[in-house]
Image: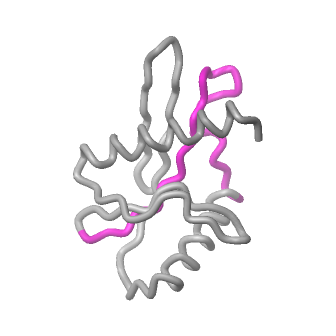
Amino acid sequence: MTQHTNWLGQYGEQRACEYLTQLGYKILDRNSRTASGELDIVAAQDGTLVFVEVKTRTSHVAGNPLAAITPSKMARIRRLAAAWCNAKQVPNTQVRFDAIGVLVSAGRVSIEHLIQVG
């Protein structure tokens, strides 16, 4: 991953956190890493634990940012979420998987939020 790509991903995740916070979500964890992968954002909203995958792009040349979230990626995120809950000793609770696409172009940031992905 290049330094620019790393910066862009961090920038997009920060914008996504700000967006979620404005909607009343409580951010519980960010960039939670294990040997199996990384969870971008773990948040809570109205008693639901929400695992949020964030994809950031500077154009639509490679397609919509959300198109990068494939079924196999969602399966990996579900496994990571289960491991996160186990490590944090989270009791049985309602869980949801969301995706946020961040487009940064011409000095503007636009956000697309899909609730309950896959």
Q: Which residue sits furthest top?
A: 106
x and y, in percent, of residue 51 in the image: 47, 62
Residue 26 visible to an observer of this rendering: yes
* Residue drawn 55% across the image and 42% down it: 10
- In the image, 37: left or right of 25? right
**Camera-nearest residue between 98 and 17:** 17
Across and down, in percent, residue 75 comes to 65, 65
Left or right of 77 in this view: 24: left
Query: Residue 25 location in percent, x, y?
Result: 28, 55
Quarter of the image where the N terminus is located: top right
Can residue 97 be spotted in the picture? no
Question: Residue placed farthest to the right in the image?
Answer: 1
Q: Residue at x 44, y 56 (%)?
A: 116
The mark tally for this picture is 0
Specify whether residue 62 is painted magenta.
yes
Q: In the rendered structure, which segment of residues is drawn in magenta?
A: 47-72
**Image quadrant occupied by the C terminus:** bottom right
With respect to residue 105, does 102 lie above or below? below
Quarter where residue 71 is shown: bottom right
Based on the picture, tell me whether residue 91 belongs to the magenta stretch: no
Q: In the depicted view, which residue is nearer to us: 74 or 84?
A: 84
Residue that sits furthest to the front in the current view: 3
Quadrant for residue 29, please give it.
Answer: bottom left
83, above or below 29, in the image: below
Q: Position of residue 43 (x, y in %)?
A: 37, 61
Q: Is residue 7 above or below residue 30?
A: above
Colouring used for the render: one colour
Report the residue at 46% width, 82% height from top: 88
- Asked if residue 43 is positioned above or below residue 11 in the image, the reply reads below
